[in-house]
Amino acid sequence: MNEPLLKRGMENPLIVDLITFDPGENEVVMVMEERRPWESVTQKQVQEKFNSYLGYVLEGFLFQQYVQYTGNPVRFELQCIEKPPPSWDPFLTAVISFAKSEKIRFFISLVEPEVFQKRDAETKNSI
C-alpha cells in the first residue's frame, strides 16, 4: 500500500499527531507537534489543532478507539523545537486555562528535532 502519509504538525488540524500513555503520571498523552520556528506559526493553527483534540476527547472518540485508556486522565502536550515567544503568553495561558476547565492538563515541552525525525522513521517503518 503506497498511500501518502498525511503530514503531522500544527498546520494539519485533521491529524492527531501522537497518542501515547505516560505510566508515571497515569495519563493518556495526546501530542501536538510543532516543528517550525514560532514566527511560522499562527494562533489560528494552534486554536484549530487544540479544538480538534478537544473534540476528539469530549465527544468520546479517544476512549472509543483506545478502550484500554478509559478512565485515565488526559494531557495535551505541545512539543516544539523552541520556546514560544512572550507575545504568545496570553493566548497560550487562555488555551491552558480552557483545557484545565475540561479537566485536561496542557503542557508545552521543548524537544530536539531528532525526536520528530525518529518518530517519522518509526511511523514509516510500521506501515
Image (spheres, rainbow, N blue to C red):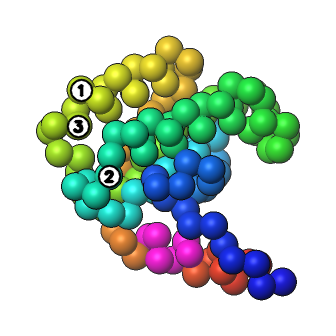
User: What span is colored magenta in the figure?
Assistant: 115-120
Q: Amino acid at mark 3?
A: Trp
Q: Which residue is mark 2?
A: 41
Front of the two marks 2 and 3: 2
| Residue that appears at 40% across and 27% down | 95
The answer to whether residue 110 is above or below residue 92 is below
Foreground: 18 or 94? 94
User: Which residue carries the number 1 mark?
Assistant: 90
Give whichever of 87, 106 is nearer the camera: 87
Instruction: Answer whether residue 64 is visible to the viewer in this image.
Output: yes
Residue 116 percent across, percent down from the top left: 46, 70
The reply to whether residue 110 is in sight is: no
First in sequence: mark 2 or mark 3?
2
Label disc, if present, on residue 47 of the rendered structure? none
Badge 1: how crowded within 10 Å, few (<14), some, or many (20+)?
few
For badge 2, the amino acid type reads Val
Residue 20 % position (x, y) = 64, 52
Give me the residue at 38% from left, 64% from top: 35
**Horizontal and vertical percent for residue 70?**
79, 32
